[in-house]
Image: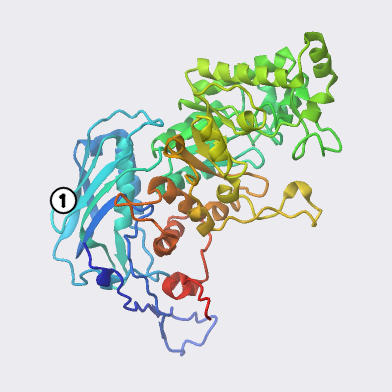
Amino acid sequence: MLSLSLCLATVVALTTVTAQAPSALAYSSSLPIQEIQGIPAVNPVKQPWIWPLPQNWERGSNTVKVSKSIRFEGKGARQPIVSKAIKRYQDLMFKKEDYPMIPYNWSTTDNKPSRSTLSTVVIDIKSNDDHLDLDTDESYTLTVPISGKAVLQAETIYGALHGLETLSQLVQYYPERKSYYVPNAPWKISDFPKYKHRGILLDTARHYYPIEVIEKFIDTLSWNKLNVFHWHMIDSTSFPYVSKKYPELATHGAYTSRHVYTAKDIKHIVQFAKERGVRVIPEMEAPGHSTSWGYGIPEIASCPNAQPYFGYTVQPPAGQLNIAHPKTKEVVHGLIDEWAELFPDSFFHAAGDEVVMKCWENDTYITNHLQNTNQTLMQLFENFVLDMEDHVRQKKKTVMVWQEMLLEYHFNLPKDTVIQVWVGSEGVKEVTSKGYKTIVSAQDYWYLDLGFGRPRSNPYPEVQGAGFNHWNRVYSYDMRANLTKTEADLILGAEATMWGELADPNNVEDRLWPRAAAFSERLWSGYENPKGEELVSADAILRLLPWREQLVLRGVRAGPLNQGFCTRNPLDCFQPPNPAA
């Protein structure tokens, strides 16, 4: 283990930039070539430049050169999913930046030319079963010696994928030597996730996302050791899913004939994600937020496009499923049948959020039905929801719903229902105290789409948008707050969200990253290390800054965390306020 003094060394790393020869068309050829001494850059490398931080790690003080022809051997390396991953990482491992904004602080490791070269990694996987679900073991161990072969061991292929990601982050490019090295060797890493469910909700209904954009999104999830893509595919605004049984839903409900997802597209995305250790969980938004269903099958919609929409929906266009019409249940069951086959994951999100009663109260079909059957509206609503969820369970799926089902409507949900909390962090306590397992998506911390105004109120400037969840606010949220141990144990994990009102393929990466990376570390690394020491943002920022640069190098349009000077010199910028000043 490096000594603290060595870890905290702040030797200045100067970057020398040689100006390019000026173009004869633009400048006089007699101008001299200049050398520019860059602004000092100091990062103490207090913790490893690995994101998210491994549970257990030991490092030394030697520097090992890495061969660009590095080989991966062992039975595990021949497993098809791992073999494909190796090809990807043989590229990712050797990304380089000749003039990095955050040069590695080579004073924290033996800076002498390496006498040995890492040229082989042995991969050992106990099980070749490629089943991926909530309880899949994602642990791994990684050792990188001073000489000899590195060894990656895992219980499953998905643990091996995480180990490959960690190995790729250990490799640093040394611009002055034009070579790649693993600093601070030898390394011993033993790692596993704190929470099983670590996801991002992406809304592809309000704005359509092409397949290649979703692929890149999934790639970035995997690099951050996130393992769930919560696919919010349909909403009031559009119905892009091309159903086999009800094709008219997309024919009339998609934005255009190109803005659709076919069964073939979905199968491709599910397999693409699986090969990166990412589960795909579909959300069937119903019975609220369902205007688009009615464009194709009008009789299953209530209050479609009611004007003015205020009072009928939380945002335009108005419209919910007609929960009294028999055709509605038929269509919902049919779509569940199709999705149960297309999405093999054991979880299925049945939504149930943001229903507006006025919509149904002004639907004569529903009011007549209530009178004829001697039911209340809430009884009809609960029966519809429970029938929908029961049909999901018949497909051997675990039902997820939004918190309104339990906390606002007070429906009698089976205890195996997983409740996703979003309306304020206090909902976590309410749900777990009732004995339900939960997925946490507290909007006051982990809604990454907030802070850019409220589009449903445009063009009315007096209506304020919700606050922006800065990376440190994202990182600071402890979802276990005020919970008993029994209640905290009911937290399966969490999802950050990217709702689509003001995000589309042109800006979504900047909105997500690197804030979603801050989120990912809390789900993987937790809040304390195995020794009980708290993981704090003052240490995290020293790793998040270079990780953001690495994401950019990998092609992700991740937003900056601060000005360039602070990126290069975080200790000069990220200081606690001095009350006496």
> Is residue 251 something one can see in this rendering?
yes
Please name the residue that numbered disc 1 is placed on: 149
Is 441 placed left or right of 141 in the picture? Answer: right
Identify which residue is drawn at 77% across, 53% down: 463
Give, as a three-letter code, the residue at label 1: Lys
Residue 361: give x, y in percent of width and height.
82, 25
- Compared with 328, 410 (above or below) is below
Is 317 placed left or right of 544 in the picture? Answer: right
- Pick the quarter of the image with the N terminus: bottom left
SS assignment at label 1: loop
> Is residue 177 something one can see in this rendering?
no
- Compared with 481, 112 (above or below) is below
Is 240 placed left or right of 525 in the picture? Answer: right
- Compared with 107, 485 (above or below) is above
Q: Foreground residue, 22 or 490?
A: 490
Identify which residue is drawn at 27% across, 42% down: 140
